[in-house]
Amino acid sequence: MEFPQQQKPAGDGKIIYPPGVKEITDKISNDEVVKRLKMVVKTYMDMDQDSEEEKQQYLSLALHLASEFFLRNPNKDVRLLVACCLADIFRIYAPEAPYTSHDKLKDIFLFITRQLKGLEDTKSPQFNRYFYLLENLAWVKSYNICFELEDCNEIFIQLFKTLFSVINNSHNQKVQMHMMDLMSSIIMEGDGVTQELLDTILINLIPAHKNLNKQAYDLAKTLLKRTVQTIETCIANFFNQVLVMGKSSVSDLSEHVFDLIQELFAIDPMLLTSVMPQLEFKLKSNDGEERLAVVRLLAKLFGAKDSELASQNRPLWQCFLGRFNDIHVPVRLECVKFASHCLMNHPDLARDLTEYLKVRSHDPEEAIRHDVIVTIINAGKKDLNLVNDQLLGFVRERTLDKRWRVRKEAMMGLAQLYKKYCLHHEAGKESAQKISWIKDKLLHIYYQNSIDDKLLVEKIFAQYMVPHSLDTEEKMKCLYYLYACLDTNAVKALNEMWKCQNMLRGLVKELLDLHKLPVSEANNTAMFGKLMSIAKNLPDAGKAQDFMKKFNQVLGEDEKLRVQLEMLISPTCSCKQAEICVREITRKLTFPKQPTNPFLEMVKFLLERIAPVHIDSEAISALVKLLNKSIEGTADDDEEGVTPDTAIRSGLELLKVLSFTHPTAFHSAETYESLLQCLKMEDDKVAEAAIQIFRNTGQKIETELQQIRSTLIPILHQKAKRGTPHQAKQAVHCIHAIFNNKEVQLAQIFEVQAIKLLVRWLLGMKNNQSKSANSTLRLLSAMLVSEGDLTEQKKISKSDMSRLRLAAGGAIMKLAQEPCYHDIITPEQFQLCGLVINDECYQVRQIFAQKLHLALVKLLLPLEYLAVFALCAKDPVKERRAHARQCLLKNISVRREYIKQNPLAQEKLVSLLPEYVVPYMIHLLAHDPDFTKPHEYEQLKDIKECLWFMLEVLMTKNENNSHAFLRKMVENIKQTKDAQCPDDAKANEKLYIVCDVALFVIANKSTACHLDSPKDPVLPSKFFLIQDKRRPHAKHESRHLSHLSFKQPKPAPVLGAVNKPLTVPGRRIFTKTTPASDTTSNTSTNSSPLSSSTINKNR
């Protein structure tokens, strides 16, 4: 190789080497070249810019080192040493380089750039020299000389690419700093950054490159931060050409613009100051996919943790929010997903997002409604304060969504919030109170018809509300206070849940019992029925039926499986045993080679519903202990947010419900001792619940717990005699359920139950062959005649007498509903029963009227019992009279509607047509014990009021000439005798007087009553005796009408005729408790058709 011609210096042109350094030519070996160059390097390193003499002396050497021999030398050590020398030469001769040729400068800097690749290996023996080279170049800013070159961009691009490619995690901070200084000086001191150079920086931000070389990404990130003021214009120009002008050819990175924007924003938002308005333009693009890409980008920018973009660029934020209503479904979906991060990172934007999420929670797309829930729940799980009540309300609404996937997500999300903040109290009591409604809402869903909803509620209850994984004491404490805090509907739902699970356990038990019987057609039919009933309680009834048939077949073949299932549904199965049984049954039905097993999943649904995961003997004992602590005042009631009284009452209600579904779990002396303490408490509800628990669970008390029995009997007797009506009823039921000598116990208490017992027995027989009904009716009549005191020794309390009168009247009414007994009830017994509606005790009148109405409206009682309501006109309480009138209206309406709807009813008009109640009413009023003086003004006025009370309702409309029919019916009664006492002249006279008053009321109510009636009324022979010859009507009238005179009344409102003061003489006197306004006299002509001024008072 020939040595290149050197550029001669100003002197003689001879190359002067430092002392001790021989000439360096191509004639010597590489090792010798390296040795001599090291001495040259040392010389240049020691020189500084002030060494003018040396600079001139070694100028020829500097030119020589830039020759082709050195720049293209194949030995890397030679090249490195030459590069170090050249770097020092630029330092020493700065600011003017000794090289004047632009081509030479380009070659030199490209040569130096290539040597910088040696920085990659930090373990190389030569690394320190490479570092010296970098440090020297950075400190002197040697590359700035290249600004004068036309094609300097090529040098800079190569330099940037080299530095980004060699940097790695083994480099220390100094290396990174020098690289940064070198590149930043080029950007900041140049005239601008070309697109190609910008690409060398930005390419390191693209995710694919970022993941390959994290150090290059960090270097680019730091470089952009340092040069933000200079490079921002270049970046804006790049994005403007790509986004606005659509010139994707300007850069190979055009397809990564959105990734770059995200990265640049994360580095420094100032880098995108001019770019953001361009994104607003893109958000309004007609291309849905383009809008989607921009939305994804902006979602990341707005949602970034420390982003202030929303506050700094409100127009862009508002434009972005508008995309929540985009026509393109993926765009709306992306917006909803963004909301989750935004809520978590920027709570201050929750108000802006709420309204848009509200609209999207009703989006027609199921996926969007689903993601709205996920968004809100995720934010809530991170911090409940991130979601306001309105956002939680959206989730609450979606629990009733038409799509199961959405409902499930909403329910599970709320359950997770409840467990985190209410059960574990992760954010304090205030947060727990904020979502205290969740427990009620979740349980309310059990009212839905879908079996999927019910099963999910059961799962949520077992895993989130009262986690079955807790130990027994914690689990029961959780249940105890949860039950105390639930609203009424949630309590009913929870009770229904336990009831359904218990019912399903019963079905499985019956199925297993059928497996124990011999195979037969009847047995197979019964099994099929049980399987269908079980399938109805599982999801997807069609598949459930097939899977249950298969499960039943497996049960028939596998005795061990049947044993496990029997143990699972056994009343004595503990929660721990249940887990083992479920695990064993599942293991037997698992097929390892089958990844998905729908049959097994369906069986798991069944096992989850029937397994006692919460309640066993240990659990009941823990609940009772909690109840004892509440009674003693040592419980944590106040800390749990309930008062001790509420805790006690709800705790007993909980135990009462569980006593229905898990009675065996209560059978322990400790449990019963605690319940006995509850029986002695003053709270009526508490005592009543305790009695019911004994009733449901105490079947073995008499034989196994004698001490409990001896304490319990006196308490039950006392409750039966002196407790509230409910307590008395429950006490009798309890005695009947627990004790063998129940008859003796019942006889000691009271006679009301005996009356009900007799009636139930007669209703069960449905015949009177033994004449037992006659004796029973005589007993009941005697009870009413004696006003409830059969012995007449006045040893029974007033309240007990009232109960007995009510029971006797109700019993006669109950027997009258059975045709075989109705026929033997005499008119006298009917009248005694009807007079109960005028009892002196308000509660007796109220309850009797209610029972009478319910039986009549169901068409269970004969028509004559409707006449009893006429006696309500004498009730001193205005509300009772109004109630009776409503009952009359309802019953008359029901009967008329029944006749219209049933053509066959025409044959039974005598027992259905409301107008046929009039004969019974007239007969009942004629035998009213208070109607003793038929010519006395006050008594006639009472009769008139009772008649008016019924007739006013009957005669509201004149359908089918009914008014003339009523008149003819009453006139026909006057041609008969009283069948009850046909030979008693006074009784017949009272009957005819009541008929005369009724005729006058009818005549004054209607002008059409004097028309001819097309039908001839039929009178009940049990009450009226048809005479052989017609009696002289006018002659008889003269005997009693001579004391009466009538005149046409003025029209009056109905209540004016009903609400009047009463002073009813007779065997019982009412106590008036109504206010003064209710007892005002209304005896004017406006009150009714019969005017008090026209009746001559018979003194």
Image (spheres, rainbow, N blue to C red):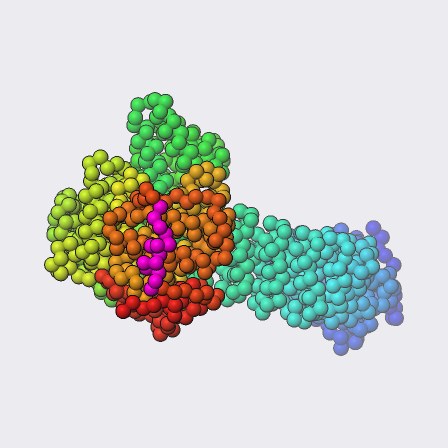
Residue 867 against residue 93 in the figure, above or below: above
Residue 859 against residue 278 in the figure, above or below: above
Q: Main secondary structure of the magenta part?
A: helix
Q: Which residues are magenta?
A: 1030-1043
Left/right placement of residue 1036 relative to residue 284 reads: left
Residue 1033 included in the magenta stretch of the image:
yes
The front one of 741 and 1049 is 1049
The front one of 908 and 772 is 908
Left/right placement of residue 644 relative to residue 226 reads: left
Residue 1031 in the image: x percent, y percent?
A: 34, 48
Kindly identify the residue that appears in the image at 62 percent across and 59 percent down. 359
Does the image show residue 334?
yes
Does the image show residue 18?
no
Figure quadrant of residue 16: bottom right
Left/right placement of residue 930 relative to residue 748 reads: right
The front one of 904 and 606 is 904
Q: How many marks?
A: 0
Kindly identify the residue that appears in the image at 40 percent across and 49 percent down. 969
Residue 653 included in the magenta stretch of the image:
no
Kindly identify the residue that appears in the image at 85 percent across and 61 percent down. 151
Figure quadrant of residue 318: bottom right
Residue 614 in the image: x percent, y percent?
A: 33, 49
Residue 931 in the image: x percent, y percent?
A: 28, 60
